[in-house]
Image: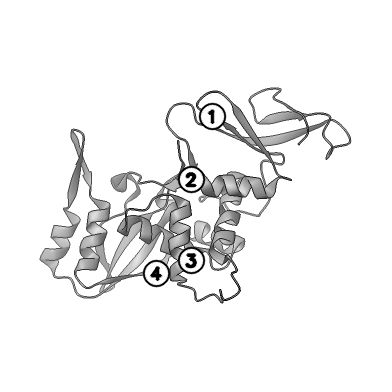
Amino acid sequence: MGKTIISNWNKQIHISNDIFFKNTTNLGFSIKSQLGSPSTLLNAGKTTNFIYKINGSLLPQEISRINSLMVKRGKKESADLKGRIKAILQNNCTLNFHKAQKSIFSNNLVLIDSLLPEILSQIVLDFYSTDCSHLTDLVTKTAIKNPLNFNIENGHTFYEYKIKRFLTDVALGMMPSQVWTGKYDATGGYLIVKENGDVLCYHIYNKNEFEDYLLNNTKLDTASSSRHQFGEIYEEHGALYVNLNLQIRFIK
């Protein structure tokens, strides 16, 4: 890798003496700091909710009981989201992906890969119904289930490849609330400021290393269910649904 000099912190990096650049070039970099609490890669919002249809029968009193499940965290109570999903499943119900709540995010995902909404919906469901949170574990779990029935007899890593592509696009510019055209905001790469002050620099031309870093160093996290309106069973047109949220955070 060529010599990289940080000239300022407004996402502009000065590259010099780099074998990939014949001339001195100013490039834009995305910057994530690990100083303090781990930063998010994909921020939560109503924009990142996935809607699941509940197949099975739930009595009104059982719906009320499930929606009221809470858990204590310190002195505060919050929605027991995993407990609610487990309770739905324990009532002999299944959760089937219906759609992403917001069409812009859904279309952004389809632009990256036409099957990405279905793949992410499985990963999100596994996060809320199991003890897994690291993205590597969730992708492995999805690959073993192979819900999209890919032909894996030759060892193709369909799910890992597609999730890596998604993570890269998120890191370099894709936002759930804005139409994504595939053009990267960060034309140079990605900077991570570690807890000890060290700076990791991933150039776009080191794509494999960058993708591996994103997959191996991220996890799904739980956002505020009241703020982003997810985690409660609701009825619409005679059917029962529940929304689950996607938020991706770096691992400290």
Choose mark 4 or mark 2, whichever is in front. 2
Name the outermost residue toward the front. 154
Comes first in the chain, label 1 or label 4: 4
- Mark 4–mark 2 distance (CA, rounded to whole Å): 26 Å
Please report contact status of discs 3 and 4: CB closer than 8 Å, yes or no. no
Quadrant that contains the N terminus:
top right
For numbered disc 2, what is the local secondary structure? strand
Query: Mark 1 sits on what residue?
Result: 194
Query: Mark 4 sits on what residue?
Result: 98
Amino acid type of the residue that numbered disc 3 sits on in the rendered structure: Ala
Instruction: Please tell me in which quadrant of the rendered image residue 84 appears.
Output: bottom left
For numbered disc 3, what is the local secondary structure? helix
Amino acid type of the residue that numbered disc 2 sits on in the rendered structure: Thr
Q: Which residue is depicted at the point 65% across and 46% down? A: 209
Q: Residues within 10 Å of mark 3 (few under 14, many from 20)?
A: many
Q: Residues within 10 Å of mark 4 (few under 14, many from 20)?
A: some
Choose mark 1 or mark 4, whichever is in front. 1
Q: Residues within 10 Å of mark 2 (few under 14, many from 20)?
A: many
Amino acid type of the residue that numbered disc 1 sits on in the rendered structure: Lys
Query: Mark 2 sits on what residue?
Result: 218
Residue 172 x/y as whole percent: 62, 45
- Mark 1–mark 4 distance (CA, rounded to whole Å): 39 Å
Query: Mark 3 sits on what residue?
Result: 143
- Mark 2–mark 1 distance (CA, rounded to whole Å): 14 Å
- Mark 3–mark 2 distance (CA, rounded to whole Å): 18 Å
Residue 89 visible: yes
Amino acid type of the residue that numbered disc 4 sits on in the rendered structure: His
Seen from the viewer's position, the closer of residues 131 and 37 is 131
- Mark 3–mark 4 distance (CA, rounded to whole Å): 20 Å
Seen from the viewer's position, the closer of residues 28 and 144 is 144
